[in-house]
Image (cartoon, grey):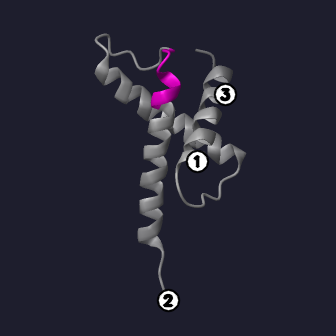
Amino acid sequence: MGIIAFLVIGLLAGLIARALMPGNQSMGLIATTLLGVAGSFVGGFIGSLFRSDGRIFDLHPSGLLFSVLGAMLVLLLVGMAGRRRRVHV
C-alpha cells in the first residue's frame, strides 16, 4: 500500500474514531491523522491475530473497521494517561 493511501486511511480512521468517542479531543488535522495511523497499526495487529497468514500491512475490506477500533483504543489510552498527569488544585 502506498504512503498516500496509508495517510488517507489514517485520516479517515482518526476522524471516525474522534466522532465516535465521547468527550472533547482538542486535536488538529495532523494529530488526527497520526491518531488514525497509530490506530491502523494497532488495528492491523489485532486483525492479523484473526487471519491465518498474519500479514499486518495488507489492505483488507475490514482494514478501515480495525483501523477505527485501533484508533479508538489509542484515543482511550491517551485520554487515560492524560487524566493521570493533570494536577487538580
Q: Amino acid at mark 1?
A: Arg
Residue at x 60% of width, y 47% of height:
19
Residue 80 image position (x, y, % from top left): 42, 61
Mark with earlier residue (2, 3): 3
Residue at 30% from the left image edge and 23% from the top image edge = 49
Under mark 3, the amino acid is: Val
Question: Which mark is in front, 1 or 2?
Answer: 1
Q: What range is drawn magenta here?
A: 59-66
The one nearer the camera, 80 or 18, is 18
Q: Nearer the viewer, residue 35 or 61?
A: 61
Report the amino acid beneath label 2: Val
Q: Which residue is mark 2?
A: 89
Which numbered disc, 1 or 2, marks the residue that appears first in the sequence?
1
- According to the picture, the residue beneath numbered tag 3 turns out to be 8
Q: Which mark is residue 18?
A: 1
Mark 2 to mark 3: distance in Å? Answer: 41 Å
Figure check: 54 above or below 14: above
Of badges 3 and 1, nearer the viewer stands 1
Q: Say which of 42 and 65 sits in front.
A: 65
How many residues crowd mark 3 within 10 Å: few (<14), some (14–19), many (20+)?
Answer: some
**Residue appearing at x 51%, y 35% in the figure:** 68
Residue visible at 44% across and 53% down?
76
Q: Is residue 61 above or below residue 28?
A: above
Residue 81 location in percent, x, y? 42, 61
